[in-house]
Amino acid sequence: MFTKHFWGQILAVFRNISSRDLRETNTPACTDPTRFFAAAECSLDDFYLFDGVPEASGTIVDFRFSYINPNAERRLGVPREALYGKVLTEVRPFMVKSGLIQKYCEVVRTGIPYRCEVFIDDEMINDTWLNVQVVRIGNGIAITSRDVTEHRRLSDRINYLAHHDHLTGLANRTLLHEHLHQAIFCAERDGQKVAVFLIDIDHFKQINDFLGHANGDILLATVGQRLLSSVRESDTVARMGGDEFVVVMPNFRTAEDVEHCGEQIIRSASQPIEIGGRMMSLTLSVGASIFPEGGRTPEELLGKADAAMYKVKDSGGNRVCVFDRGLMAKRRTAARQETLARAALYADRFANRVTGTGNAIPAPWKSRR
C-alpha cells in the first residue's frame, strides 16, 4: 500500500509537468494533473518519468527514476518505490552497453524525440523486444515502451520464409542473389575472387521415381545439410529448385583452390544415405565459375557455372569442372553441330515423305502415331 507522502510526490511531478511544459495549451487537462496521473496509472504501455542528473557543467549525463507506472513495474519485477531516486545506469547497466543512455541525453539536449526498437535480455527484462519512445520533459525525459516481441517474431518468420527454401531451410533464389551481389561488391572493392558452384545430383529423376517423392524430399534435405556442413560459415548455400544447389564462396586465389573445394563438396555430400530402410549411393556433378574471369554479374557467373556443370554431366558426372573460355567455345560449337544435325534429320525425313502423287507432307514437328 502506497503512503500519502508517496502519492503527494507523484502528483507534484505531474503538476510540475503541466505548469512547466503544457502551460500554453488551453485544455482542461492542463489544470488537472490528476487526470494525467490516472491515465499513466491505467496505461497498457510501460511509462516512466526520469529527472536529469547533471554533471558539473550542467550537462545531463544520466537520469533518476521519478515515476514508474504499474505496467512498467510488472515488467521490471521490482517494487517501484524501491527504484525511485536511483540512477538509471546503476540500476540498468544495459543502458550504457547498448548506447541508449547517450540517445536519452541527446533528447534532453536537442528536444528531438527518439524512437527505436531494442532487444533486451538482462537481469531485469529477459528475451524481449521493446518499442521505445522518449520525449523531453524539462531537464528530464518521459519514456513509453511497449512489448513487440511477438510482432517481431512473426515479422522475422515471414522474412525468413521469403528468403529460404521451405524444404531444406537453405537460402532461396532471392537470398542467393542478394548474397552474390554483396560478395561481388566486396570482391571488386578488395581485389578478391568469388567462386560460384552449381551442384546437381546425378540421375535424381530415376532416384526420385524409385524412392517416391516423400523420400526424395528427405534426400534433398540431407544433401542440403551436408553441403552446408562442408563449407565455411561465411559461404552461402542455396537451393535453386529441383535437385540443383548453389554454393557461393568468397576470397579465393586460384582455380586450383576452387577445384579442390569442389572435390571436397562432392566427397562430403555423396556419402551413402539411408532412406526408407535402403542405403543409397549418389554422385554429384559440379560446375564452377570464378569472379571476375567467369563473369562480373550474378547472371553471368551462374550461367558459366551451369555450362561447366553440363560438361560434367555430358562426361558421366561425379566430378567438378571449372569454367574457362575454351569451354564456352566448345559448347557453342556443340550447339551449332546439334542444330545442323537436327536440320539434316528433318530435311531427310522431308525428302523421304515426298511421293509422286503429291500427297500432303506432314510437318516434321507433329507427332506420329
Image (cartoon, rainbow, N blue to C red):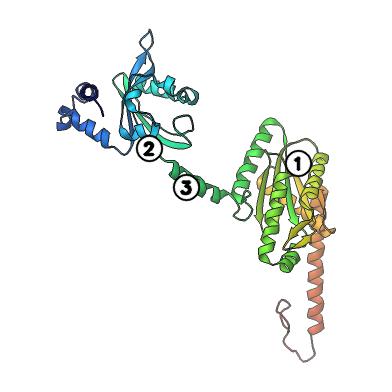
Q: Residue at x 44, y 33 (%)?
A: 125
Do labels 3 and 2 touch, CB within 8 Å?
no
Secondary structure beneath disc 3?
helix
- Three-letter amino acid code of the residue under disc 3: Leu
Residue 78: percent from left, percent from top? 38, 29
Q: CA distance from mark 3 to mark 2?
A: 16 Å
Name the foreground residue: 328 vs 353: 328
Q: The disc labelled 2 sits on which kind of residue?
A: Arg
Residue 154's disc is 3
Image side of residue 4 versus residue 219, left or right:
left
Q: Quadrant of residue 35?
A: top left
Q: Earlier in the sequence, mark 1 or mark 2?
A: 2
Q: Which mark is residue 293?
A: 1
Residue 157's mark?
A: none
Quick check: 295 above or below 68? below
Q: Is residue 309 left or right of residue 100?
A: right
Residue at the limit of the structure toward the top, as seen here: 56
Q: Nearer the viewer, residue 316 or 9?
A: 9
- Percent across and percent down for residue 180 are 65, 43
Under mark 1, the amino acid is Glu
Q: Position of residue 326 (x, y in %)?
A: 83, 49
Closest to the observer: 359 or 307? 307
Q: Secondary structure at mark 2?
A: strand
Q: Is residue 350 left or right of residue 140?
A: right
